[in-house]
Amino acid sequence: MSRPSLIPSSLPALRPPAISLASTERRLGARLFRATRGGALSLIAAVAMGLGLSTVASGAEPVADAASTPGWPSRPLRILVGFGPGSTPDLVARIVAEPLARSLGQPVVVENHAGASGNIAAALVAKATDQHTIGMLINGNMTIAKMLNPATAYEPQKDLQPLSLVCVAPMVLAVPATSAATSGASFLAAAKAAGNRWSYGSPGVGTLGHLGMEVFKARTGLAPVHVPYPGNPQVITGMVGGQIDLALLPPGLAQTQVDSGKLRAIGITAGRRSPLVPDMPTLAEAGLPALSLEIWTAAAAPSSLPAPIAQRLSRLIAEIVRTPDVGQKLFRQGYQAAGSTAEALGQRVQADTALLGEIIRTQHIVQE
């Protein structure tokens, strides 16, 4: 684990949220946000006092929320991320951490524990007992991690509790610009004619690009062969170079390649059009079987975290994510802000677990 580093904050005040949980008393005087990549929390306080760093105003936390958890938080809150600095979950965590620190009146520490597709960090969250540790996790960490790899050190539905869905993005079904597929109908015709001569790429076995395409194959009866790559940039290179015929891509990457004339978008994996790619139809609009399966990042806590603390964090994170400032920051990262209740996130977890779990079982998919 890398040595903690302090990020000095010159933080703007939060703009009033679009949907406020309360508009009465506000707490002031929260401590300055610090984000680190390590775990030496005492160093944060020591250095902050030594440098004489100033405080910033707290966010708009209802007094009732704070009253429900007397004495908490008593120290910095940790947000664990399962990917390295600069990754999307890392950036999302840091976007949320700044206003969350102001609301709680304590520093918020972002720690990176990369590896195992994010499951190392998720396992640390699941086993945390300090009541000051949460995670910023992706789909698989909260749904099918144990199904893909029985050696995974935690049970997602048993050991984690949902707090709030932070952001979402659909996947884009894309083909090379030179493909005969120009619409849903021509895509189906070309794919059925090609049979298993067509291939699709993904950023690896067990990724959403892989599992989502297997669901799509099951619903369409198509038979393209899976070709795993180290990451989505290599998937795009393979498509542009003619080595593979289709893929499910994140919207930002897909839009860039569509705009450059290298790829063509057939549709997105969502129930409605996305503001991230408003000109792209849903798969259903394109005349293909509907598929609602989005990339998402969410806040989760250990199942052992007391309900009053979990409820307070859930409300705060949801309200923070709904602010225009945070929404714009997430949009620039290629995501649509969500800010859900814990219950709504739990329903999404159950739905994705059922959908992807069936494919994992029927196709005998195992992640090494």
Image: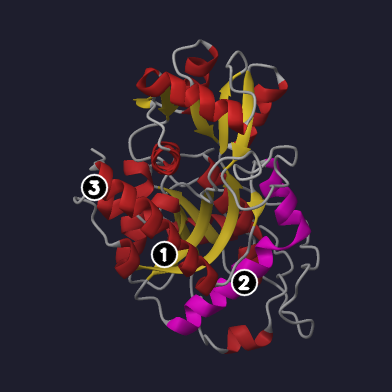
Callout 3–callout 1 Cβ contact below 8 Å:
no
* Residue 312 image-quadrant placement: bottom right
Callout 1–callout 2 Cβ contact below 8 Å:
no
Q: Residue at x 80, y 63 (%)?
A: 15
Circle 2 sits on which residue? 316
- Mark in the foreground, 3 or 1: 1
The location of residue 352, given as percent across then percent down, is 43, 57
Q: Residue at x 70, y 72 (%)?
A: 29
The location of residue 295, given as percent across then percent down, is 52, 47
Q: Amino acid at mark 3?
A: Asn
Q: Quarter of the image containing the C terminus?
A: top left
Q: Residues within 10 Å of mark 1 (few under 14, many from 20)?
A: some
Disc 3 or 1, which lies upstream in sequence? 3
Per the picture, the main secondary structure of the magenta-coloured stretch is helix
Q: Residue at x 26, y 40 (%)?
A: 367
How much space separates mark 1 and mark 2, taking CA atoms? 23 Å
Q: Quick check: can you spot residue 115? A: no
Circle 3 sits on which residue? 149
Circle 1 sits on which residue? 350
Q: Amino acid at mark 2?
A: Leu
Q: Amino acid at mark 1?
A: Gln
Q: Quarter of the image containing the N terminus?
A: top left
In the structure shown, which secondary structural element does the residue marked by tag 2 occupy? helix
Q: Which residues are magenta?
A: 307-332
Residue 318 lies in the magenta-colored region:
yes
